[in-house]
C-alpha cells in the first residue's frame, strides 16, 4: 500500500496532471466559498430575534458553523469537481504506468459525474446527521469522521477505476474480497483532505492511489 501511495503522490505532481489539479482546486474553492457565503447571507437575512446584538452573535456563530461544515464536506466537494476530469486523469496515469493494458470499457463524463454527485450528497447528509457526535464526543468524532468519509471516498474511487476494467459482477466481487484494504486507503485519502495545502491535491492523489492499488490487487489475484 505504501508503494501505491508514493506513486500516487508523484503522479499528482506530474506535468500532465497539473492543469487538472489547478482546475480542481479552483472549482472546489469557488464552490465552498459560494456555499459559505450563501449560508452566511441566509442567516443574516433571517433576523431571528429582532435584537441587534443577539442577531449579530447568531450571525458570527452561524458563519463559524458554515466554515466548519465546509471543512467537513471538503473531500466530497473536491471529488465532485474532479468528476469532470476523472476519466481523463485515470487514462493519463494508466498510459504512464500500465501501457500494456487494453482499451478500457467506455465510461462517459455523465457516469463519472453521477457517481461524484452521489458521493457528495451522501457525504453531506451523513456528516450533517452525525454533526452532534462530532461536537460532543472527543476522539470518537475523529474515528467517525475518517470512517464515514474514508468509506465513501474508497467506494467512489474504486468504482471509478474498476468499472473501466471489470464488469459489474467482478467489480463487486473484488470490492467484497478486498474491502478492508480499500477502505483503509480511503481513510488515508480522507486524512489527507484535512491537512492544509495537502488537501488541495488529495482528490487527485486519491484517484491515483486507488488505481495503483487496484492494479496491484488485480495482478496478484491473476497470478494466484
Image (cartoon, rainbow, N blue to C red):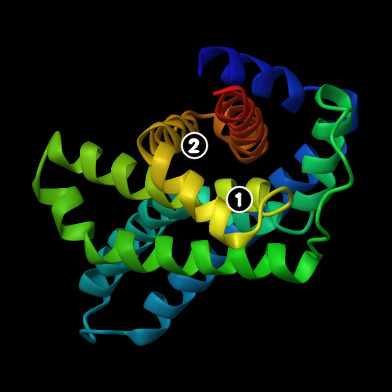
Q: Nearer the viewer, residue 191 or 70?
A: 191
Q: Name the residue tied to disc 1.
A: 78
Q: Determine the residue located farthest toward the left in the rendered image.
A: 137
Q: CA distance from mark 2 to mark 1?
A: 9 Å
Give percent across and percent down for residue 10: 72, 17
Q: Determine the residue located farthest toward the front in the rendered image.
A: 224
Tell me, for residue 193, which label it has, or none.
2
Q: Is residue 19 above or below residue 37?
A: above
| Marks 2 and 1 in Cβ contact (< 8 Å) | yes
The image quadrant that residue 60 belongs to is: bottom left
Give percent across and percent down for residue 42: 44, 79
Q: Nearer the viewer, residue 56 or 167?
A: 167
Q: Residues within 10 Å of mark 1 (few under 14, many from 20)?
A: many
Q: Quadrant of the C terminus?
A: top right
Q: Residue at x 45, y 54 (%)?
A: 73
First in sequence, mark 2 or 1: give its number: 1
Circle 2: element type: loop
Q: Residue at x 64, y 39 (%)?
A: 207
Q: Is residue 132 left or right of residue 73?
A: left
Q: Residues within 10 Å of mark 2 (few under 14, many from 20)?
A: many
Q: Residue at x 44, y 29 (%)?
A: 188
Any part of residue 34 in sight: no
Amino acid at each position: 500500500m505504501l508503494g501505491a501511495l508514493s506513486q500516487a503522490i508523484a503522479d499528482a505532481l506530474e506535468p500532465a496532471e497539473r492543469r487538472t489539479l489547478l482546475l480542481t482546486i479552483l472549482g472546489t474553492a469557488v464552490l465552498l466559498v459560494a456555499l459559505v457565503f450563501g449560508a452566511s447571507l441566509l442567516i443574516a437575512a433571517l433576523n431571528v430575534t429582532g435584537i441587534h446584538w443577539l442577531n449579530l452573535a447568531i450571525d458570527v456563530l452561524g458563519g463559524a458553523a458554515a466554515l466548519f461544515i465546509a471543512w467537513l464536506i471538503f473531500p466530497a466537494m473536491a471529488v465532485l469537481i474532479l468528476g469532470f476530469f476523472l476519466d481523463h486523469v485515470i487514462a493519463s496515469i494508466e498510459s504512464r504506468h500500465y501501457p500494456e493494458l487494453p482499451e478500457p470499457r467506455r465510461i462517459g463524463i455523465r457516469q463519472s459525474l453521477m457517481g461524484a454527485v452521489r458521493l457528495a450528497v451522501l457525504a453531506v447528509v451523513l456528516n450533517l446527521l452525525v454533526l452532534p457526535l462530532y461536537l460532543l464526543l472527543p476522539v470518537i468524532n475523529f474515528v467517525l469522521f475518517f470512517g464515514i468519509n474514508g468509506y465513501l471516498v474508497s467506494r467512489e474511487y474504486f468504482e471509478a477505476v474498476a468499472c473501466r476494467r471489470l464488469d459489474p459482477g467482478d467489480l463487486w466481487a473484488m470490492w467484497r474480497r478486498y474491502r478492508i484494504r480499500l477502505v483503509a486507503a480511503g481513510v488515508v485519502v480522507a486524512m489527507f483532505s484535512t491537512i492544509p495545502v495537502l488537501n488541495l491535491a488529495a482528490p487527485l492523489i486519491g484517484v491515483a492511489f486507488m488505481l495503483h492499488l487496484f492494479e496491484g490487487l488485480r495482478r496478484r489475484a491473476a497470478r494466484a
